[in-house]
Image (tube, rainbow, N blue to C red):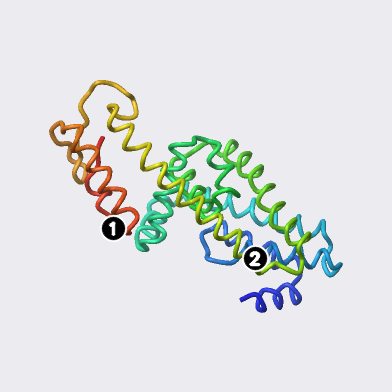
Amino acid sequence: MTETILDLMTDYGVAILFVVTFLSCLCVPIPSSLMMLAGGSFAATGDLNTTATVAAAYTGAVAGDNTGYLLARNFGTRITGWIDANPKRARLRDSAKSYMDQKGPISIFLSCWLVAPLGPYANLVSGMTRFNWARFALWGALGEVFWVGIYVGLGYSFSDQITTLAGMLGNISGLIVALARHLSARAVAMACERGGPLNDNRPPRASFQGLHCAPISRDFCIRLKAADHYNLVKGHNFSRAFKVI
């Protein structure tokens, strides 16, 4: 993989950086982080212009973010079907939504670099929920400054260790995503135990495939959320049929 990326960088220069970061923000599984590390390494040796390298990676990422947002905003139903067809994509979408529910607008900024695997799905969720485009674009543009700056900067500084760096950063990012998923599940369970997100005294109610049911007990609510989280991790779709409201 590393040799292929280096060959592409040699053949196409900064243009490949734009294409790769653009596609990665549209949920295409491309090693964009490794490519940016390689770009930084080539810039350090003088084979690529540093400014052009950063500009190509950044504009591709920002363009990809906003393209994903607009596609989801205009074709949300079709994109939802495409996501649901793959359990891994569905889990990432659900994790991105939970993370955004917990963190609010700043989650768009953080998903660009701190929890980068959720970033493309945060773009789609923002579009589907019709989050304000101007605010989305601003938070996303700020986040991509960190994403591009960190990876290109590390590639520039440690040009002879990009493979090791890519592995380390990938492990850290995966750990952060797993931690965010765990904390989101705990937050949902705690909110349910306190009486729901509104923290009122109404007993929670169940909804099965869109049909509202009778009030349910707090204990059942907590057990349901625990099962919900288990099925989310395992890739099942139990939560989409039966929900606590």
Q: Which labelled disc corresponds to residue 236?
A: 1
Q: Residue at the spot x=24%, y=21% of the render?
A: 201
Nearer the observer, 200 or 82: 200
Q: Which labelled disc corresponds to residue 34?
A: 2
Q: What residue type is labelled 2?
A: Leu
Q: Which labelled disc corresponds to residue 94?
A: none
Relative height, residue 221 to residue 66 (above, below): above
Residue extending furthest left? 214
Q: Where is residue 193, by image quadrant?
A: top left
- What secondary structure is found at the residue carrying circle 2? helix
Asked whether, in this view, residue 196 is left or right of residue 156, the answer is left
Relative height, residue 133 to residue 146 (above, below): above
Nearer the observer, 134 or 97: 97
Q: Across the whole image, how many numbered discs are drawn on residues?
A: 2
Residue extending furthest top? 201
Q: Where is residue 10, by image quadrant?
A: bottom right
Q: Residues within 10 Å of mark 1 (few under 14, many from 20)?
A: some
First along the sequence among labels 1 and 2: 2
Residue 179 percent location from the top left of the image: 46, 48
Residue 13 percent location from the top left of the image: 76, 70
- Quadrant in which the N terminus is drawn: bottom right
Cα separation between marks 1 and 2: 31 Å
- What secondary structure is found at the residue carrying circle 1? loop
Asked whether, in this view, residue 242 is left or right of residue 109, the answer is left
Q: How crowded is mark 2: few (under 14 residues within 10 Å), some or many (20 or more)?
A: many
Residue 138 percent location from the top left of the image: 63, 39
- Quadrant in which the C terminus is drawn: top left
Q: Which amino acid does label 1 sit on?
A: His
Q: Where is residue 154, by image quadrant?
A: bottom right
Q: Residue at the spot x=78%, y=61% of the render?
A: 156
